[in-house]
Image (cartoon, rainbow, N blue to C red):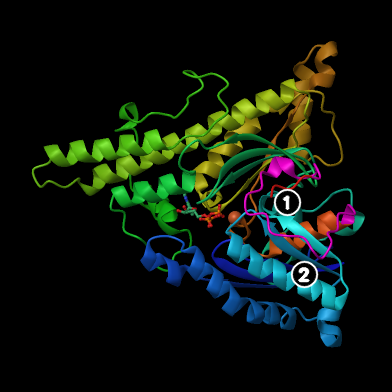
Amino acid sequence: LIALGIETSCDDTCAAIVTSDRQILSEVLRTQHHLHEPMGGIVPKLAHHAHMRNLPSVVQEAIQSAGLGEQGIQAVDIIAVTRGPGLAHSLGVGLNAAKTLAAALNKPLIGVHHMEAHALTARLTTRDPDQPNDRDVSVSESGVPIGSDPYPSFPFLTLLVSGGHTLLLVAHSVDRYTTLATTVDDSIGEAFDKTARELDIPWLPGRAGGPGASLEEFAKGSIDPGRYLERLPIPLSLRSSKNEMKFSFAGLKSAVTRIVKQEKATSPSGEMEESKRQDLAAGFQHCAVTHLCQKVEQALVDCHEKGLDISSLVISGGVGRNATLRSRMDEICGQFEYGGAIATDKMSSKEKKKLKRASTNATPNETLKAARPVRVICPPPKLCTDNAVMIAWTGIERYQQGLVDPYDIDIVPKWPLDMLGTGVVPE
Ligand code: ATP
Ligand code: FE
């Protein structure tokens, strides 16, 4: 099965061709950062017009570079496109192009929820052990290694952390998701960006990841990362507000601002020394990551109590590039063990050993409760941010479940993921 994916929900114009056996045949991404950056944020009208200018040649390039042979676009079996959520006019450009292509070629059309696509990406970049044909480790044309992580079978947890989102979800199946927590103020990406600006962190031009990545790099220079920890709150910490499944970053950001002001006021030069700024950057990162970890831990407990046997935690979105976040989540999930598991072929030998150890120490009644760890899966950084590969792949997963859309579907700029599968689409 070959899918063409089109993504225009925000400020990148993307097209890609992906196969059901996990080959990324082509991927083209034309960014608009140079248009929006001088304006201090994304300008919807500029994005709309840039998509109109760029999409035809982006799609053309994706088709030409996919190696589809003489058949060209006729070799494509399905056309998948982001339907929402996102900027209304930007979404319209992609959706109309996809609908017209699909209708003209008489191919199935699949309207994709952008967040479902972020969640399902990890099922493209890992191998399904139940599919015998799926066992060869391959490397896509773009150099993305496929098959190095375990496969996230349903249900799994997804933590989506980006410039626009801070979301913790349960993925129950294709088309069915439950939101566990979202942010009540800033997204985590915004918090990293604002803090980087507050701390005058030199932006590393040409380096992927923007101010958040610069902050992470800058914090590595910290000699005393604990220096400010007493003055930095861990938001909605479990100890103070139990069971609160929400994210919040505004308070942490304000605390950073306060400390910077105080330090500047007491410094003879009126500036904050670099070493102190590094310590504050490290402190901020620690608190932001701890906040995410506490909520994930709580979610794992809640899911377990509800009898949901979570297989893994999939981390995606731009902030998912952060190495501290990845390793702290590894620690949390590695310690977390679900009962009721028995050794299966799907487990790595390390997991089997751990399970055996747990079983040996258990009383007979507890043997079956021996546990397996929840595994953390991070798609390659390139596929954590917006791209059309994930749209094409989600099109394939939906098509395989018989989920095809008519040619007259409309955009859905505001679309809670929980509404997928209910048959109801917001106006
Ligand atoms: P969305 O996809 O939700 O609409 P977006 O396009 O702004 O939003 P992404 O491109 O996924 O989001 O992520 C960008 C964010 O990720 C920025 O806020 C950036 O600072 C942050 N970021 C990137 N790399 C890192 C890193 N290593 N550590 C922390 N934050 C990072
Ligand atoms: Fe996105």
Does 410 appear in magenta? yes
Residue 204: x percent and y percent?
37, 63
Q: Residues within 10 Å of mark 1 (few under 14, many from 20)?
A: many
Q: Looking at the magenta stretch, what is its main secondary structure?
A: loop
Give the amino acid type for the residue marked by disc 2 in the picture: Lys
What's the residue at 85%, 49% (across, down)? 129
Q: Where does the image place residue 108, in percent across and percent down from the top left?
A: 86, 66
| Secondary structure of the residue carrying numbered label 2 | helix
Pointer 2 residue: 99
Sequence-wise first label, 2 or 1: 2
Q: Is residue 193 above or below residue 36?
A: above
207 within the magenta span: no
Q: Position of residue 88 (x, y in %)?
A: 60, 60
Residue at 16%, 42% (x, y): give it.
264
Mark 1 lies on a secondary structure that is: helix
Q: Is residue 266 left or right of residue 204?
A: left
Residue occupying image coordinates x 76% and y 57%? 394
Residue 338 to residue 173: above or below:
above
Instruction: Answer yes or no: is residue 25 visible.
Output: no
Residue at disc 1, CB closer than 8 Å to ligand 2 = no
Q: What span is colored magenta in the figure?
A: 400-423
361, 127: nearer the viewer? 127
Residue indicated by mark 1: 120
